[in-house]
Image (cartoon, grey):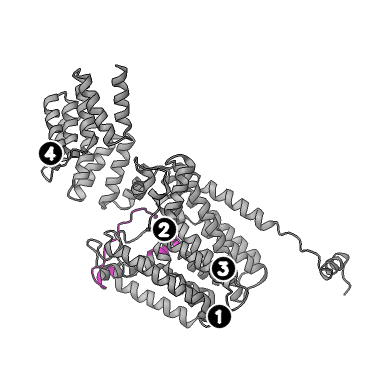
Amino acid sequence: MKKTKRQETKTAAAAAGAPRPIMWWPWVSAGVALLVVYQIYAPALNGPFVLDDRYLPYFSAHTSDRFGDWVGLLRPLLMASYWLNFTMAGGAEPFQFHATNVLIHFATALMATLIMMKLIEWAGVTGKVRLGLAVVSGAIFLLHPLQTEAVAYTAGRSDSLSGLFYYAAFAVFLWRRGESIGWLEALAVLALFACAIGTKENTLTLPALLLLTDYFWGRGSVKKNWILYSGLAVAAVFGAAMVWRIIRNQETAGFHTEGITPAMYFFTQCRVIWGYIRLFFLPAGQNIDPDIPLSQSVLDHGAIVGLIGLGGLAGAAWIYRRKFPLAAFGILTFLLLIAPVASFVPIKDVMSERRLYLPMIGLLLVCCEFLRRLTFARIIQAGAVVLAICCVLTYKRNQVWASPVTLWEDAVEKSPEKYRPRFQLAYAQFERHQCPAAVRSYEAASKLQTPDNELLVDWALALDCMDRLDEAMDKLKIALQRGETAHLRTQVARIYMRKKEWNQALAELDTAEKLDPHYDVTYLYRGNIMHIQGDVLGAARELQHALQLNPDNEITKAALAQLRTR
């Protein structure tokens, strides 16, 4: 057969050592994907901080921009990333934090694509089919609605950023130049592993994943890669010591978690893991705060069925590892990566969607096992349909995350008997001056659990907002019966101030000062009363003292400015 002129030109250019043409399509595809993912997450980009966000440094009114005030021994790289956002935005600007989360998620999806490409190649899939499977898998990782919590939730950055470092380390390991890893590659893996551990502790599984990969695919051994594994062993010891120090004393995650024993948590997770798998394949009913009953024993709530199912799944993966290598490796990888958050170490919230962020790659490998038998065109067609569905669902989920009210309304609808969603909804409604709705929500929450002082005080504020002052006072008096604090006494004083009963208000403030002489609100309220009564010098003295105790209190500053004007 004669060669065409174009083929002869290519052959001659190759023989002459001519440079290969630049591959432009990956760059264009990545740029389009970045634009798409920002559009999909657009509704939540300006969403306010919620839940755990409010306990992080950037939310505090006393936050400084000094690097040392942010970064310590606990998750230093995560905190450094928050510090960068805070300094670049000149404060706690939600858009800056959320936009960074989307960018981190996009970079993680690129790493996932590289990982999938190499593993698919090792499974014997080549050419366009390999490329199609890898790109579709990476795109699903990028656009799957189950990723929303890790991206739209600012505190979810611990999962996405640690996932980026974890996947990057795994990609370097997979794309090494030979069976044995070189010094530079080993150092890169170790450095990325350290970054992952410095972001979130569940990434401690990386050494086990690398060992599993070498053994499963037969691409290396501990002996050949001794440079890497010796370094990982040392790093793993330090990482495990750090993790143990954290979980040993934590009340929300660790062996001191109230009301949950390791056995109860394990039995519950035997059910929860199947919930994660269901949400991956059928992402309906997503919920920031699911109501999951605890399994007190292996027979409670069908935990034994989940346990037998997981054992059967792992056994099938091992038995059929040669016939279905991608699915088998994917199942083993998924179970390994989910283990730190779904095994024996109790976590107060027994289920959270963002915990599937890192293990999702295992489920994507299972999908690739069945798609690999299709032609390239069919893979692209099926992928386009799945991705279109993902885009719609993820966009709708981001609309829910756009506001705390819509987020907690959604949670209340799906977990109607759970206390926390009701309480959080009430608080969100009060913040937006939806006082009647907030009062109704606080009342509903009080029927689900004996009200604590936090609920009673917030409930009183909502009643105060509606001018139901006597009812507000009743809630505060119930709270006072459980223990006095300066904050409670000042809230009682505030109700008396609203009633213009100045003597009673001053008496409550005197009591508050005795309970805590460093509580600035006491002096703010006393200064306001003195101002109203015409004692300008006394008011100035009290307000200045309040400002000394809390220089960031904008209300005190405004009161002083008004006093000076007078």
Q: Residues within 10 Å of mark 3 (few under 14, many from 20)?
A: some
Q: Residues within 10 Å of mark 1 (few under 14, many from 20)?
A: some
Mark before the other along the chain sequence, 2 or 4: 2
From the viewer's perspective, is 118 left or right of 269?
right
Residue 192: image location, x then y, percent:
50, 64
Residue 311: image location, x then y, percent:
38, 77
Q: Is residue 115 above or below residue 31?
A: below
Amino acid type, mark 2: Arg
Mark 4 and mark 3: Cα distance apart in space: 62 Å
Amino acid type, mark 4: Lys
* Residue 298 within the segment the image draws in magenta: yes
Label annotation for residue 477: 4
On the rendered image, what quadrant is the N terminus found in? bottom right
Label annotation for residue 172: 3
Asked if disc 2 and disc 4 are in contact, CB closer than 8 Å, the reply is: no
Task: Give the magenta part as a residue range.
Answer: 275-302
Which residue position holds label 1?
220
Mark 2 and mark 3: Cα distance apart in space: 24 Å
Mark 4 and mark 1: Cα distance apart in space: 70 Å
Residue 227: image location, x then y, percent:
52, 76
Mark 3 and mark 1: Cα distance apart in space: 14 Å
Mark 1 vs mark 2: in front: 1
Which residue position holds label 2?
354
Amino acid type, mark 1: Gly
In this rendering, does residue 528 appear at all? Answer: yes
